Image (cartoon, rainbow, N blue to C red):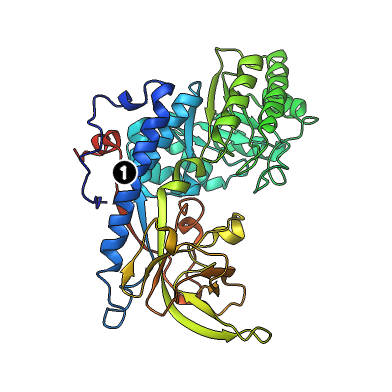
């Protein structure tokens, strides 16, 4: 897939080496801030160029469809931020979060591993010449044919959390390298995963005994504190439990070499979570043990911006105040790229991109106001639950043909979009690159 990259700015620092701009923490915040400012300019340019080229009165059907602008430089910055704050932990990107091919291509070049949950994800990652040892099949309940496929491709690392899965692996892939996934306290997360996956601590000994009897190879322990976790101590408690399982395994003759601390990271609270996790690892896990993680949204949430078009408007009069408000209908909604509202508990914030023949981006006057015109924003489908925003105010009068943009739309959005009502779930992505290191890796310099 080719990259569409808008013009680079002279203010972009020259590349002196892959990590030269992030070599010490004292300068990292300044470099990240500079990169964010450049990113804003590039994203704004790409949005402006696209929407100003579309006349909804005469365009071809589909020309005004929603589209993304993705800054791969933001993915690069997040990777360097990870290396600064969690130098001991090798990231294995959670492909399910956003399987964008250029994100995977960049992360493969950066040397990350990949957390895959299906045959298709393994297949996609290996298209980028990723070695099998850089993949963990982190799905405790696997399809039989997918296990056989993993074996055929040499993807040995995989998770389990129950006896039935051990018997399955013994039959289909006895040479697999297994991680025992344990349950955690994930009550502080947006998406709780231990409701479905993870062995409770009273069962770990029995599972290790069965694995020993079956002659299977246990190489590590894994856990997940839940997607978008907010309690740093959840990591410490999980590491304490993992330490216990390491000791249980040692008494049974297993020599575990890896701890998989899962995901749960967000950009907003990354540093305090990382500090608590790092301290727990230093206190409880010997230095010879390898540690990997499975970040997903952390890498991509802030890298993608979505633009969507107003296709219809309905005028509403408040029966008490007699003030006029509007219901706005976009060409994207809960069954499309806003699926994150339902599946990921997100609240995307609409900002005006174009109205009254003027284009706005990162402009205070185009953001929501406290006392402006009242709107509700809806998706295009026939389902009444397809509501993006129940109430929002703008100073501007929004009309059919205008555009909104939504930031932080890179995680669990297009990967779970559907074709309900016949609307497409495939939308263009315009790529920009705000970091010289990313441009070099992708061959853009």
Q: In front here: 212 or 271?
A: 271
Residue 88 % position (x, y): 51, 21
Q: Is the residue marked by circle 1 packed among few (<14), some (14-19), or many (20+) residues within 10 Å?
A: many
| Image quadrant containing the C terminus | top left
- Residue name at image x 28 percent, y 64 percent: 50
Which quadrant holds residue 183?
top right
Q: Pick the residue in front: 314 or 147.
A: 314
Q: Can residue 405 be seen in this view?
A: no
Tell me where residue 248 appears, x and y as whole percent.
73, 19
What is the quadrant of residue 422 in the picture? bottom left
Q: Residue 212 is drawn in which quadrant?
A: top right
Residue at (77, 30) in percent of width and height = 201
Relative height, residue 342 to residue 118 (above, below): below
Depth check: give the residue in front, 419 or 66. Answer: 66
Q: Which residue is drawn at 37% across and 44% down?
A: 103
Q: Mark 1 points at which residue?
A: 38
- Residue 190 lies left or right of residue 335; in this view the side is right
At mark 1, the secondary structure is helix
């Amino acid at each position: 897939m080719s990259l569409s990259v808008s013009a680079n700015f002279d203010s972009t620092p020259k590349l002196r080496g892959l990590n030269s701009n992030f070599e010490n923490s004292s300068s990292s915040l300044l470099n990240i801030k500079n990169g964010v400012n450049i990113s804003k300019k590039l994203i704004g340019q790409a949005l402006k160029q696209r929407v100003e080229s579309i006349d909804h009165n005469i365009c071809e059907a589909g020309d005004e469809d929603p589209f993304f602008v993705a800054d791969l430089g933001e993915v690069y910055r997040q990777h360097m931020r990870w290396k600064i704050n969690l130098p001991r932990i090798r990231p294995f990107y959670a492909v399910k979060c956003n399987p964008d091919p250029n994100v995977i291509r960049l992360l493969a070049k950066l040397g990350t591993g990949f957390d895959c949950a299906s045959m298709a994800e393994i297949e996609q990652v290996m298209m980028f010449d990723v070695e099998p040892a850089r993949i963990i099949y982190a799905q405790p309940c696997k399809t039989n044919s997918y296990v056989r496929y993993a074996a055929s491709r040499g993807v040995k690392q995989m998770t389990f959390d129950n006896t039935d899965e051990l018997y399955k692996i013994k039959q289909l892939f006895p040479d697999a390298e297994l991680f025992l996934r344990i349950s955690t306290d994930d009550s502080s997360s947006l998406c709780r995963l231990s409701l479905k996956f993870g062995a409770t601590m009273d069962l770990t000994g029995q599972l290790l005994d069965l694995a020993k009897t079956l002659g299977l190879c246990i190489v590590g322990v894994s856990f997940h504190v839940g997607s978008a976790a907010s309690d740093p101590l959840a990591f410490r408690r999980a590491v304490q439990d993992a330490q216990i399982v390491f000791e249980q395994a040692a008494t049974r003759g297993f020599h575990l070499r890896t701890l998989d601390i899962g995901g749960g990271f967000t950009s907003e609270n990354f540093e305090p979570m990382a500090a608590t996790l790092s301290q727990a690892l230093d206190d409880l896990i010997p230095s010879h043990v390898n540690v990997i993680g499975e970040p997903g949204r952390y890498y991509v949430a802030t890298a993608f911006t979505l633009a969507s078009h107003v296709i219809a408007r309905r005028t509403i009069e408040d029966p008490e105040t007699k003030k006029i408000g509007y219901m706005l209908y976009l060409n994207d909604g809960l069954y499309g790229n806003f699926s994150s509202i339902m599946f990921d508990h997100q609240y995307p914030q609409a900002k005006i991109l174009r109205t009254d023949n003027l284009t706005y981006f990162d402009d205070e006057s185009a953001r929501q106001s406290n006392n402006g015109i009242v709107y509700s924003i809806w998706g295009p489908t026939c389902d009444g639950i397809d509501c993006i925003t129940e109430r929002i105010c703008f100073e501007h009068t929004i009309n059919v043909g205008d555009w909104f943009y939504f930031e932080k739309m890179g995680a669990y959005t297009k990967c779970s979009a559907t074709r309900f009502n016949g609307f497409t779930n495939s939308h263009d992505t315009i790529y920009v690159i705000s970091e010289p290191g990313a441009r070099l890796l992708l061959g853009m310099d």
